[in-house]
Amino acid sequence: MKFNYKKIIYWFPRVLGLLFAFFMSLFATEIFNEGYSVLKTIIGFLIQLIPALIILVFTAIGWKKDAWGTALFTILAIAYILYFKNQPWQTYVIISAPLFLIGVLFLLNKIFGEKKEKPAEKGL
């Protein structure tokens, strides 16, 4: 069986983006232990899901356009570091490092992944 690294390069950033969105959504569950009313709990839960939804949207954009995925995830990683200054270094490793890694993986797919033929290049 032939090792197809191009498929791995294609799928790895996409799956990692979905898993990271799931990881970020786990933080939203902390609202259920706060003792708020049902309405405030639902609103708080939805607000805390916003980062996970942003990551899902960026993953969907990167799914079609690797260059956009590279730019969006890299900008998001840098923005997190700049916006949340004076955090422990572990926070940056847990949040920014995976975002930056996903951006780099989209870039690797753009560079080394399977090239799609343009319709004009196909023979009739």
Image: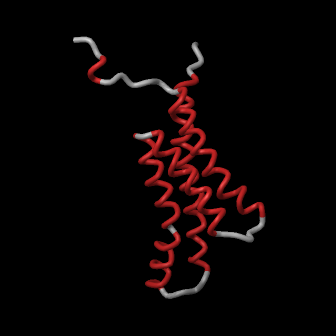
Image position of 104 with respect to 78: above or below = above
For the image shown, how many numbered marks are present on the structure? 0
Report the quarter where the C terminus lies: top left
Q: Residue 19 versus residue 64: which sits nearer the camera?
A: 64
Q: What residue lies at 53% left-to-right and 32% top-to-bottom?
A: 109
Q: Is residue 81 left or right of residue 17?
A: right
Residue 16 image-quadrant placement:
top right
Quadrant occupied by the N terminus = top right
Quarter of image, res 29: bottom right
Q: Position of residue 82 (x, y in %)?
A: 64, 65
Of residues 13 and 106, which is closer to you in this image? 106
In front of the other: 90 or 76: 76
Question: In the figure, is residue 45 to the left or right of 93?
Answer: left
- The residue lying at 47 percent from left, 41 percent from top is 67
Colour setup of the view: secondary structure
Q: Check the image and report above or below for 120 versus 105.
A: above
For the point 54% across and 26% down, which residue is it? Answer: 112
The location of residue 72, given as percent across then percent down, is 50, 51
Residue 14, position as x, y percentages in the image:
51, 42
Residue that appears at 61% across and 73% down: 30
Of residues 70 and 98, the one drawn nearer to the viewer in this rendering: 70
Please determine whether, in this image, residue 88 is positioned above or below residue 70: below
